[in-house]
Image: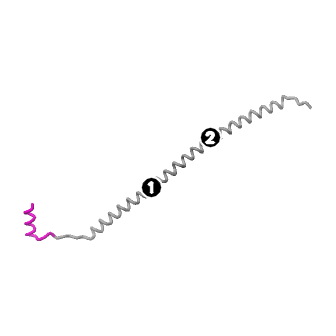
């Protein structure tokens, strides 16, 4: 192969160097686009992670508030039942008791 290359050099002269600035500009543009895409995806990933963390905190708060709501609702139900039973007892006492003047 070396002999063929030497013979080509003697017959055709030194190889021509093709410098194409358009190819270099396209390569630089492609690299710039790739780096910009990586930067953009990194920023979007951070934003998404922050949103997920905030959403998880909000869900935790909602669960706590839901549990408190259920407890208050249970207490309210018990209070209503107690009031109703007390009301029935008072009405029974009022109707069946004799008032001594």
Q: How is the image coloured?
A: one colour
Q: Horizontal and vertical percent for residue 43? A: 43, 58
Of tags 2 and 1, which is closer to the observer?
1
Report how far apart the C-alphas of labels 2 and 1 lie in the structure. 36 Å
Identify residue for label 1.
Answer: 46
Q: Is residue 13 magenta?
A: yes
At horizontal 77% and vertical 32% (from top left) the residue drawn is 88
| Quadrant containing the C terminus in the rendered view | top right
Secondary structure type for disc 2? helix
Q: Horizontal and vertical percent for residue 2? A: 9, 62
In this rendering, position of residue 72 left or right of residue 58: right
In this rendering, position of residue 84 left or right of residue 52: right
Pointers 2 and 1 in contact (CB under 8 A)?
no
At horizontal 39% and vertical 60% (from top left) the residue drawn is 39
Q: Horizontal and vertical percent for residue 90? A: 80, 33
Q: Is residue 8 magenta?
A: yes
User: Where, by quadrant of the figure, is residue 68 drawn?
Assistant: top right
At horizontal 14% and vertical 69% (from top left) the residue drawn is 15
Where residue 70 is drawn, which disc sits there? Answer: 2
How many residues crowd mark 2 within 10 Å: few (<14), some (14–19), many (20+)? few
Predominant secondary structure, magenta span: helix
At horizontal 10% and vertical 68% (from top left) the residue drawn is 9
Q: Which residue of the protein is positioned furthest toward the right in this rendering?
A: 101
How many numbered circles does the render carry? Answer: 2
Secondary structure type for disc 1? helix
User: Where, by quadrant of the figure, is residue 32 drawn?
Assistant: bottom left
Magenta residues span 1-15
| Quadrant containing the N terminus in the rendered view | bottom left
Q: Horizontal and vertical percent for residue 4? A: 8, 63
Q: Is residue 99 above or below residue 39?
A: above
**Label 2 or label 1, whichever comes before in sequence order:** 1
How many residues crowd mark 1 within 10 Å: few (<14), some (14–19), many (20+)? few
């Amino acid at each position: 192969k070396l002999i063929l290359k030497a013979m080509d050099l003697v017959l055709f002269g030194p190889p021509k160097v093709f410098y194409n600035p358009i190819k270099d500009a396209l390569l630089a543009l492609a690299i710039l686009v790739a780096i910009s895409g990586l930067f953009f995806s990194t920023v979007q990933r951070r934003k998404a992670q922050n949103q997920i963390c905030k959403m998880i905190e909000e869900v935790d708060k909602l669960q706590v508030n839901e549990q408190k709501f259920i407890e208050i609702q249970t207490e309210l139900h018990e209070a209503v039942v107690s009031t109703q039973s007390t009301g029935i007892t008072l009405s029974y006492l009022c109707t069946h008791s004799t008032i001594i003047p």
